[in-house]
């Protein structure tokens, strides 16, 4: 019998595992920063659909009207390309 005690081999540091952990930490930190920091976006411009003074508006493809039950819009053409929405008829005339 051998009297020498056998020791388990020393753990090797794997550069691949270290890189994977580093990437995971960077991803988590980026997501947390994106969620926790305040956004610096300008206030969105008011849409003509949200303007109560606009009774009829279009985006070049559909025409919408503000009715008592809510907005009602036509169906767009099959190959229509929308443009910037604009008001066609205001409350004042």
Image (cartoon, grey):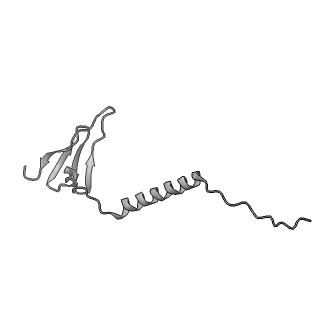
Left or right of 35? Residue 2 is: right
Is residue 7 rendered to the left or right of residue 58? right
User: In the displayed structure, would residue 47 be above or below residue 7?
Assistant: above
- Nearest the camera: 56 or 35? 35
Residue shown at the point (46%, 59%) measured from the top left: 28
- Pick whichever, 39 or 3, lies toward us: 3
Residue 73 vs residue 4: left or right? left
In the figure, 87 relative to 38: above or below?
A: above
**Residue furthest toward the top?**
79
Q: Is residue 7 above or below residue 67?
A: below
Position of residue 18 measured from the top left corner of the image (x, y, whole percent) = 55, 55
Residue 9, x across and y down, in percent: 73, 60
Q: Is residue 18 left or right of residue 90?
A: right
Residue at image coords 37%, 59%:
34
Picture residue at 26% right of the left edge, 49% below the top: 72
Q: Which quadrant of the rendered structure holds the N terminus?
A: bottom right
- Farthest residue toward the front? 3
Q: Position of residue 64 (x, y in %)?
A: 23, 46
Of residues 89 and 20, the one drawn nearer to the viewer in this rendering? 20
Q: Furthest residue to the right? A: 1
Q: Determine which quarter of the picture holds residue 37.
A: bottom left
Image spot of residue 90 (x, y percent): 11, 50
- In this rendering, the answer to whether 54 lies above or below 77 is below
């Amino acid at each position: 019998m051998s009297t020498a005690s056998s020791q388990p081999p020393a753990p090797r540091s794997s550069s691949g595992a270290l890189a994977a952990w580093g990437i995971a930490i960077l991803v988590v930190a980026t997501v947390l920063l994106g969620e926790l920091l305040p956004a610096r976006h300008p206030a969105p411009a008011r849409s003509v659909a949200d303007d109560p003074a606009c009774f009829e508006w279009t985006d070049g493809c559909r025409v919408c009207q503000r009715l008592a039950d809510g907005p009602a819009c036509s169906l767009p053409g099959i190959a229509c390309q929308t443009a910037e929405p604009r008001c066609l008829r205001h409350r004042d005339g």
